[in-house]
Image (tube, helix red, strand yellow):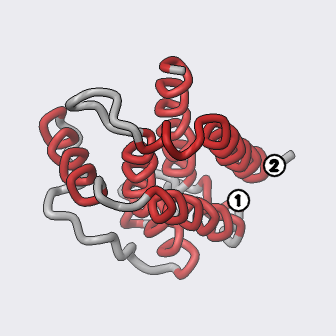
Amino acid sequence: MSMKSHILAALREQVEAWEATLARLGEAAIVAQTGPSAWSVKDELAHLWAWQQRTLARLEAARLDRAPEFPAWPFDPNDESEEGTERINTWIYETNRNLPWSTAHQNWRDCFRRVLETAEGISERDLVNSDRYAWLNGHAIVVFLLGTYDHHQEHLETLNAKM
């Protein structure tokens, strides 16, 4: 199995694991706030969807051989400081907290499907070549697919630990 096939298979398994967990929980548990400052499962999924859109923008740019067109965020999404990440995540929560569960779930599912489909259309050589896309500043596009997997896994592990 090629690296690309392996990564895409792992991402598909991640979707299946999330869907199985969501099915076990049911909508009432998914939308329930677990505390005054705690996110609901719906909020977690909306958070993942928001970050996933950036991965999708990179993949679409790679596939079309152009610079990425990221969703507009009021903060620098490249600010990796603790304060920067907290500011972004708070904005994502505030922006999406009133979405109905069905919308949040559909947004996440559709974006994940598009990530997989778009990645399928990029050659493995282009996915792993750190010099292929100048706008990635020496990173290979595969790093963002792996980041999507890791981000989803981190949130799923936290969710499963609460169950």
Depth check: give the residue in front, 63 or 89. 89
Residue for point 21% across, 53% down: 94
Q: Which residue is mark 1?
A: 124
Residue closest to the far right: 1
Residue 29 lies, in percent from the top left, at 49, 37
The quadrant holding residue 121 is bottom right
Residue closest to the far top: 161
Residue 162 lies, in percent from the top left, at 48, 19
Q: Dot 2: what SS?
A: loop
**Gap in angstroms between the C-alphas marked 2 and 1:** 8 Å
Q: Which residue is mark 2?
A: 2
Residue count near mark 2 (Cα–Cα under 10 Å), binned few <14, some 14–19, many ≥20: few
Residue for point 67% across, 68% down: 117
Depth check: give the residue in front, 88 or 132. 88
Residue for point 36% across, 56% down: 137
Residue for point 37% across, 49% down: 47
**Left or right of 125 on screen, residue 106:** left
Residue 100 lies, in percent from the top left, at 41, 61
C-beta proximity under 8 Å, tags 2 and 1: yes
Is residue 131 visible from the viewing direction of this image?
Answer: no
Is residue 10 visible from the viewing direction of this image?
Answer: yes
Q: Amino acid at mark 2?
A: Ser
Q: Quadrant of the C terminus?
A: top right
Can you tell which mark lies on residue 30? none
**Depicted 64 relative to depicted 52: above or below:** below
Residue count near mark 1 (Cα–Cα under 10 Å), binned few <14, some 14–19, many ≥20: some
